[in-house]
Image (tube, rainbow, N blue to C red):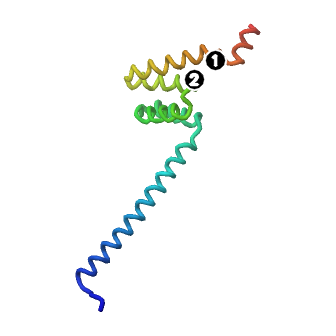
Amino acid sequence: MVKTGPSNELNEKVVADFNKSENDCETDATEKQKRKANKTNYSIADLLKQVEECLDNFNFELAVKFCERALDIEPDNVEVLEMAGTVFLETGDIDKAKSVSLRSDMLELCLGPPNGVVILGLLI
């Protein structure tokens, strides 16, 4: 004999809620993977363009986030380091601005100027 009544309905509700929460966890994990995949789809050029647009609109917090994302992807990219230095300086984070600017200068010294600059220097 199957019991029906409040306790059986409550058990069914608990089981249904549990199944729903398991599905929500799977959905959350899937959405996190999608968001992570979307982050990696941006190129450095795209990120730097976004930084410039944010600076033009005085949205410094978002500009910092785009710079940090670009630095995560290419920490030795001189263009990214220079842009990050500018953004950190604009936001008042002097220590970060000094750090990335120093790194940018060191990389430029180690790598030397681009070949086009050397060629132009020889032609003049």
In this orientation, which residue lies closer to the viewer: 116 or 35? 35
Real-space Cα distance between discs 2 and 1?
Answer: 10 Å
In the figure, is residue 28 to the left or right of 4? right
Q: Residue at x 49, y 31 (%)?
A: 67
Q: Is residue 9 above or below residue 115?
A: below
Question: Which numbered dot is residue 78?
Answer: 2
* Residue 69 x/y as whole percent: 50, 35
Q: Nearer the viewer, mark 2 or mark 1?
A: 1
Crowd around label 1: few <14 · some 14–19 · many ≥20 (10 Å): few
What is the number of callouts on the image? 2
Question: Which numbered dot is residue 111?
Answer: 1
On-image quarter of the C terminus:
top right
Q: Residue at x 53, y 33 (%)?
A: 70
* Residue farthest to the right, as pictured: 123
Q: Residue at x 43, y 36 (%)?
A: 62
On-image quarter of the N terminus:
bottom left
* Residue farthest to the front, as pictured: 1
Q: Earlier in the sequence, mark 2 or mark 1?
A: 2
* Residue 48 x/y as whole percent: 54, 32
Mark 2–mark 1 contact, CB under 8 Å? yes
* Residue 99 x/y as whole percent: 45, 20
Amino acid, disc 2: Val
